[in-house]
């Protein structure tokens, strides 16, 4: 899937370059400038993620958010997910490992949904681009939705 996106992007970039070379170069320069502006904050985020992964290994997490931990485990899972920034291609295999290690389905659902949707670590970057009100509203609603996900998973798995 990623390869398809890269190929499509490359083709569209070449098409744009063929249609108007100056506009394409101007757009690429703006994109590079935006990347340079975001890079320092992005490096801080990556460093924080590395530290969190080192501290919160799968064994510790599964012990705290086991199937018998109930809603306190769900709350803990949403908090950990909200402050952790892990890409999806790492998060989903991690979730599988946690389930194999005894984590509960509700807790993992809450963890993954808050992990993918809530970005406490990235709030400074998000505020810069979207504004304070939009950032807090989006993150707050995403956090609440993580509980909805956990509730539905709990209803489906126990039914």
Image (cartoon, rainbow, N blue to C red):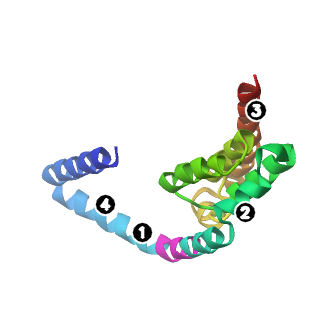
- Total tally of numbered discs in the picture: 4
Q: Which mark is residue 27?
A: 4
Q: Please provide percent x and percent y for residue 99.
A: 65, 46
State whether residue 132 appears in this view: no
Q: Please provide percent x and percent y for residue 105.
A: 70, 40
The residue carrying mark 1 is 35
**In magenta segment, residue 106:** no
Q: Is residue 116 left or right of residue 18?
A: right
The residue carrying mark 3 is 154
Identify the magenta region: 38-45
Labels 4 and 1: the sequence-earlier one? 4
Check whether the beta carbons of the residues at disc 3 and disc 2 lie within 8 A of each other.
no
Q: CA distance from mark 2 to mark 1?
A: 36 Å
Q: How many other residues sit within 10 Å of disc 4, few (<14), some (14-19) or many (≥20)? A: few
Label 3 vs label 2, nearer the camera: 2
Q: How many other residues sit within 10 Å of disc 1, few (<14), some (14-19) or many (≥20)? A: few
Labels 1 and 3: the sequence-earlier one? 1
Nearer-the-camera pick, 39 or 48: 48
* Quadrant where the C terminus is found in the figure: top right
Label 2: element kind: helix
Q: Please provide percent x and percent y for residue 15.
A: 17, 48
* Quadrant where the N terminus is found in the figure: top left
Label 3 vs label 4, nearer the camera: 3
Q: How many other residues sit within 10 Å of disc 2, few (<14), some (14-19) or many (≥20)? A: few
Q: CA distance from mark 1 to mark 3?
A: 41 Å
Check whether the beta carbons of the residues at disc 4 and disc 2 lie within 8 A of each other.
no
The residue carrying mark 2 is 60
Nearer-the-camera pick, 45 or 52: 52
Label 2 vs label 1, nearer the camera: 2
């Amino acid at each position: 899937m990623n390869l398809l996106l890269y190929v499509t992007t490359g083709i569209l970039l070449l098409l744009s370059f063929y249609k108007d070379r100056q506009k394409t170069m101007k757009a690429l320069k703006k994109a590079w400038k935006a990347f340079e502006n975001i890079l320092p904050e992005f490096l801080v985020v990556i460093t924080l993620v590395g530290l969190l992964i080192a501290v919160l290994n799968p064994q510790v997490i599964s012990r705290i958010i086991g199937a018998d931990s109930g809603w306190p485990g769900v709350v803990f899972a949403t908090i950990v997910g909200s402050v952790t920034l892990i890409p999806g291609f790492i998060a989903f295999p991690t979730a599988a490992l946690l389930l194999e290690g005894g984590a509960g389905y509700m807790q993992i659902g809450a963890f993954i949904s808050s992990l993918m949707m809530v970005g406490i670590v990235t709030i400074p970057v998000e505020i810069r681009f979207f504004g304070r009100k939009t950032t807090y509203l989006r993150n707050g609603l995403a956090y609440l939705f993580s509980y909805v996900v956990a509730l539905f998973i709990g209803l489906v798995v126990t039914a």
